Structure formats: structure tokens, C-alpha cells
Amino acid sequence: MPRAGLDSAAVTEAAAALADEIGLPQLSMSVVADRLGVKAPSLYKHVEGLPDLIHRIAVLAANEVGDELRDAMQGRAGGDALAAAAQAVRGYVKQHPGRYAATTGIRPTGPDDPLTAALERTLISFAAVLRGYQLEEGDQIHAMRMLRSFLHGFATLESSGGFQMATDVGDSFSWMVSFIDTGLRATSDVPVPGTVHLDSRSS
């Protein structure tokens, strides 16, 4: 009999927490089972195996990032929205490196996969940031890829201790966000509301 109160959501939450603690590569069904106080075979009543579990963690993380972006960007536009979105992603990856790692390189299995909608939420938020700069249609995809690459690369390097120089990492992050804002403003032909103001020490 499965443990009372144990379901796929509870297994996923426990696995996500473990991924943050020990790193996604160290995650296994037996480690998750130990955390939940059950035998590993009993987990297969709730998830199909480790690949399915990691997929579920990716869905959880993508939805959480979507929530962070939505809340951070509420009522903001232009440079203010860019700064808020950037700090939201950075903060999430620092707090949840393991579960965020589950989203890297993963692809939805189809239109009905919950991951499809979860990832779309983050893209919609990034598109909203860029919409404030009123870029030419041909530049929008390039700008989207630049923004995602910057945020993903910086945050994952930081969370893995990849920055070793003495200069404050928060200062570098603020400088880069301001640099991107300046570049996007220069690309746009219209005035952009909002001014980048980012607390480099936060998150």
C-alpha cells in the first residue's frame, strides 16, 4: 500500500528540495525514497521513474519562475520591468539551483505536456519586458534570445561559484542589466519609460 498522503505532487516537491540541496546530478529514486521514509519501489506508484520525476521538477520550476516574473513585473514597464525580471530570475536560480537545472535543455513531449504551458509563461513575461522597448519585429527574437542567455548564463555561473574575481558580483549584474537596457533603448526609435534601478546587493 502506498504511504498515506503520498502522491506525485508530494514526491515531486521532495525531489525538488533535494535537488536544491545536493544538486540535480546526485538525485536518484533511492535518495528521494529515503527522504520520504519509504522504499524506492513504492515511488513508482506515483512517478514512472527518474526521467519522469525530473520532468515533473522542470514543470514545477518553470511555473515557479513564471510566478516570480509575474509578481516582480507587476505594474512595471521598460527599464523598470527589465531590472525586476532580471533580479527575479537571478534570485530564483540562487535559491533553487537544483530544480532550475531540471529546466535546462528539456523539451516538452507535446502540446498537452504541462511543461509546454509552464515554459510559455516565462516567454510571455520576457516578451512583455521587450514590448516596452517597441523593437522592430525582426529584432524581437534576437533580443529575446539575448535576454534569456544573459539571465541563464549569469545566474547559473553565480550559483555554481563560477565568479572568482574580487569585484562584487552584484555590481557586475547591475552593470550588465543597465548595459542591456541602454542597448535596447538605442535600438528602439521611440522613448522608453522606466529607468533601470537595481539593488546590486539584493537576492
Image: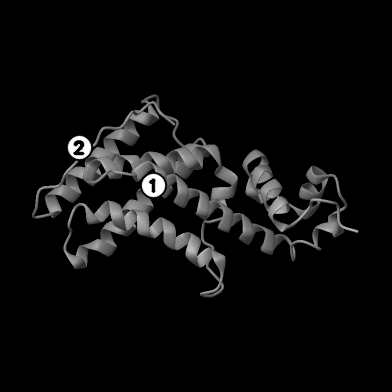
Q: Residue at x 51, y 54 (%)?
A: 63
Return the residue nearer the eye: 161 or 30. 30
Residue 4 horizontal side relative to residue 64, left or right: right
- For the residue pair 142 and 39, the one nearer the viewer reads as 39
Secondary-structure class at tag 1: helix
Q: Quadrant of residue 177?
A: top left
Tell me the residue at 45%/52% (across/down).
66
Residue displayed at 41% across by 41% down: 88
The kind of residue tagged 1 is Leu
The kind of residue on which mark 2 rests is Thr
Residue 6 image offset from top left, x and y in percent: 79, 52
Closer to viewer: mark 1 or mark 2? 2
Quarter of the image holding residue 198? top left
Q: Is residue 26 left or right of residue 177?
A: right
Residue 62 is situated, as x and y percent measured from the top left of the image, at: 51, 54
- Expressed as whole percent of the image width and height from the top left, the position of residue 25 reads 66, 50
Name the secondary structure under disc 2: loop
Q: Which residue is mark 2?
A: 195
Where residue 147 appears, as percent x and y from the top left, is 32, 52
User: Is 80 left or right of 13, judged from the image as shown?
Assistant: left
Residue to which mark 1 is pinned = 151
